Image (spheres, coloured by chain):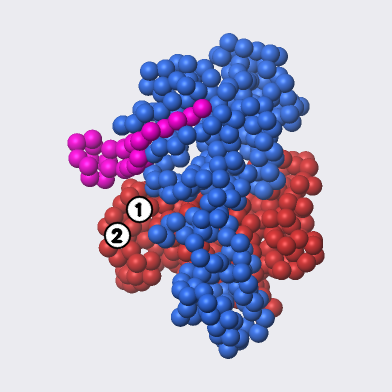
Amino acid sequence: MISLTNIKKTYPGRAGGKSSEGQVIALKDISFKVEKGELFGLIGPDGAGKTSLFRILTTLLLPDTGEATVAGYDIKKDYQQIRNCVGYMPGRFSLYQDLTVEENLNFFATVFGTTIKENYDLIKDIYQQIEPFKDRRAGKLSGGMKQKLALSCALIHKPSVLFLDEPTTGVDVVSRKELWAMLKKLKQEGITILVSTPYMDEANLCDRIALIQKGDILSIDKPTGIVHSFPGELYAVHAADTHRLLQNVRSFPGTATCFAFGDSLHVTFKDTSAAPQALLQYLHEKNHPDATVEKAEPTIEDCFIHLLKN
Amino acid sequence: MSSITSPPVITTDKLTKRFGQFIAANDLTFQVAKGEIFGFLGANGAGKTTAMRMLCGLLKPSSGKASIAGYDVYTQTEKIKRSIGYMSQKFSLYDDLTVSENIRFYAGIYGMSRPKIKEKTKELLEELQLEKEAKTLVSELPLGWKQKLAFSVSIVHEPGIVFLDEPTGGVDPVTRRQFWDLIYHASDRGVTVFVTTHYMDEAEYCNRVSIMVDGVIAALDSPTRLKQQFGHDNMEDVFYELARKAVRKGD
């Protein structure tokens, strides 16, 4: 449904287009495919190139080189067809602030030659939550409500592909869970979804993900596949005095990597055979009587950190 | 770090802010000890920003009491502003000034002397390993470095308290952890850290955490005790249980 082949994009530096000095490489050489009906996640921090990728696929930006198609249409030649059949929710709120909720929705429906009534079923679950405020201006809505309106507007023409650029950034845990529940439903309607997020824990909610950093894809797979590819063994180290524990584990000679992970530390060893036991001993000597060292299942975030380090 | 023995540097007593009929922050009563890392959590619209603005001396409370670094939030707001540092993800540094110009600018704002600024700049650049980038424009730094620099600049005048408003939004997982190393380091030197975040694993790094729901503090304790109290094994589930009861929706 979405296909990219060797997509490259650079932005000129401060000196202008003539020199390569200060040039920003947004996308290095990106190739991947998203199947029909798939919920595909682009996972990476700010500056990874996620937004450039979205803008290219929604025909708002041309790549320097490379080919891409969306719903079978070429992003350069068939941009008009693509615009008709995709829904796009940019990272920044981009609806008309001085139109009401209903006026915004009506506007987008009209632009795409349809009506709210015609596709009401698709947006019902989302739109009903903001319908009580349909006469309120969009600019006066809360963050969570703006997001629901933006999603409704992106869906009103029943797109076959939906692009969501960081829909959960700066959003609290409750609204984040709500949004992911909505995406799951849309997927069941057969809509292909490409969504980006900086939150690693949301990766598990996607069918497949690409971990992306500085314009490069680090890994691309099902979340379980990415987790399984974590090399070696990971241990969780726990003790009450976490901060001192962090310093002590880092100074332990057998430690390869050590990162804070919630209420424990995730540690890998240079040589796993004897090190876990030796570390426990070492921590007892360093006055952590309650220390525990246990094998742990890696998370997507562990994998991302591992890939960043290599 | 020990929250029991140190004297409080933030004390609030029934601190309240009303906007007309709307009570944005209601009866907030808590204390934060010197050197403590205090996580200030809440759903969008729970009243965090209103509360933070009162604590920073930027918004006059409707009722209740609060003292920050020993200064009153009604009458001594200018003294409060001098005694605290503030950093948010949205606004931190001037992109078209260099690294050292940014440091000099902020230090100057806080009235530090030229020799002191020079000394502090050297110290900061060393600590952040940014000596080579001293003359680089901030716009050309990677986001992670910017965030770390922004934090250091926010405490350049050596305040007793620093307020961090979602300081790690959007940065990669390694940088996010390096940022917390800086927070720990500041806390070790006795700086009190008051921090908001949407990353629930970061809530675990705090000494104590408060969770605001609909303008009130619904829970306040160490992460370990909060997890025990609500019977969950992580802070995300604790937060979710409290915040989903919220009636208010907004920012």
- In depth, the one of A151 and B128 nearer the eye is A151
Residue depicted at 68% across the width and 44% down the height: A177
Among all residues in the image, which is located at the extreme left? Answer: A18
On the image, the x and y values in percent for residue A163 come to 53, 31
Regarding mark 2 in the picture, which secondary structure is present there?
helix
Name the quarter where the N terminus of chain B is drawn.
bottom right
Labelled disc at residue B133? 2
Residue interval drawn in magenta: A1-29
| Real-space Cα separation, disc 2 to disc 1, in angstroms | 9 Å
In the picture of the structure, the residue carrying the numbered disc 1 is B141
The residue lying at 40 percent from left, 28 percent from top is: A68
Q: Is residue A2 magenta?
A: yes
Closer-to-camera residue (A259/B66): A259
User: Whole-percent x and y of residue B51?
Assistant: 66, 54
Rendered colour, chain B = red
Quarter-of-image position of residue A278 = bottom right
**Residue drawn where x is 72% and y is 21% of the image:** A121
State the residue lying farthest toward the front.
Answer: A273
Disc 1 residue type? Leu
The chain that hosts pointer 1 is: B
| Dot 2 alpha-carbon crowd within 10 angstroms: few under 14, some 14 to 19, many 20 or more | some
- Chain A shade: blue
